[in-house]
Amino acid sequence: MTVPRRLEGKVAVVTGGASGIGAGIVRRLVAEGSRCVVSDVQEGPGRALVAELGDATVYQQCDVTREDEVAALVDTAVDRFGRLDAAFNNAGIVGVVGPFAATSLADWERTMGVLLTSVFLGTKHAGRVMLPQGSGSIVNTASSAGVQAGLGPHAYTTAKHAVVGLTKSAAVEYAASGVRVNALAPGATVSAMTAAVITGDARSLEETERYLAQASPGGRAGGPDDIAAAAAFLASDESWYVNGHCLVVDGTREVLSDRSRKYWAARDDQG
Ligand SMILES: NC(=O)c1ccc[n+]([C@@H]2O[C@H](COP(=O)([O-])OP(=O)(O)OC[C@H]3O[C@@H](n4cnc5c(N)ncnc54)[C@H](O)[C@@H]3O)[C@@H](O)[C@H]2O)c1
């Protein structure tokens, strides 16, 4: 498939860019002409991706729960590439699993830190550069679990719903300055995260793909490239009239949600 060159001259940052959906977004951005700061807490895979993609990319270590590191990530884009046009607040974990009664405050707060506070920090610091510039696109990775309950654990569902709310609220503030803020809500997508949940082994991507394909009425599993195509659209000027929106990219939610509800109910019963 020929990829359009909609992002020529643009500069992006991607958190959680070393793996799965984030790595897919990085590849797609570069294919469309963007330069990109790849960031993660997994330095090895992050640097390997940058080595593969070449001069259009640079790696910056960034734990998204730390404000100083998120601020430094945004500064790296400006220092290395001169500007910041797109920020993907994408890093994530499954987080704490189980019934509310068995969930400790520490685990709840750790999950919120990675999935929600990180998006606040990314939106704040991307805005620091984009608002004076008068342009930019911020894309926050939510989830189909951010628009519907029963698709994931309690803390994950709560955080992802909040990401959608944060996105809308930020869009209201930033719109007047020419900066758009949207959310992307993937459904079940083949990645290390889903592999760990479905098979117990984060490396079992092929088995995960087979499992998700079976659950899909089209017989095909969604992968990082499928999410990245939507992500690139939200970063591009083609989506200039899309703001404060949550774009669900999930194949067919109805069928998958029924299976997912049963899956998480069983996990919750196990505690
Ligand atoms: N795969 C799915 O089915 C699916 C569905 C909906 C939403 N999502 C969301 O997509 C995003 C990417 O997930 P994925 O499926 O690609 O999983 P993944 O595990 O392949 O990638 C997540 C990346 O985030 C990084 N990360 C974790 N904690 C971090 C931290 N504190 N600071 C910086 N980086 C950190 C990990 O190292 C990893 O590289 C997540 O926000 C996830 O919740 C995934």
Image (cartoon, rainbow, N blue to C red):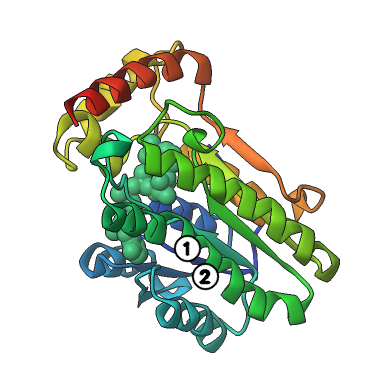
Circle 2 — which element?
helix
Lateral position of residue 81 relative to residue 203, left or right: right
Q: CA distance from mark 1 to mark 2?
A: 6 Å
Tell me if residue 224 can be seen. Answer: no
Residue 265 position, x and y percent, is 30, 21
Is 150 rendered above or below residue 18? Answer: above
Residue beneath the point at 31% across and 54% down? 105
Q: Residues within 10 Å of mark 2 (few under 14, many from 20)?
A: many
Location of residue 268 (image quadrant): top left
Residue 89 position, x and y percent, is 50, 60
Q: Any atom of ligand 1 within 8 Å of the CB at mark 2?
A: no
Circle 1 — which element?
helix
**Which residue is denoted by mark 1 in the rendering?**
117
- Observer-nearest of 147 and 248: 147
Location of residue 169 (image quadrant): bottom right
Is 69 rendered above or below residue 141? Answer: below
Residue beneath the point at 40% across and 43% down? 156
Tell me if residue 189 can be seen. Answer: yes
Is 98 rendered above or below residue 125? Answer: above
Residue 84 position, x and y percent, is 62, 75
Residue lying farthest to the right in this orientation: 176
**Which residue is denoted by mark 2 in the rendering?**
121
Contact flag, marks 1 and 2 (Cβ < 8 Å):
yes
Residue lying farthest to the bottom in this orientation: 79
Q: Could you tell me the amino acid type at mark 1?
A: Thr
Q: Residues within 10 Å of mark 1 (few under 14, many from 20)?
A: many
- Observer-nearest of 74 and 238: 74
Residue lying farthest to the left in this orientation: 201
Q: Could you tell me the amino acid type at mark 2?
A: Leu
Residue lying farthest to the front in this orientation: 101
Lateral position of residue 145 relative to residue 154, left or right: right
Location of residue 47 (image quadrant): bottom left
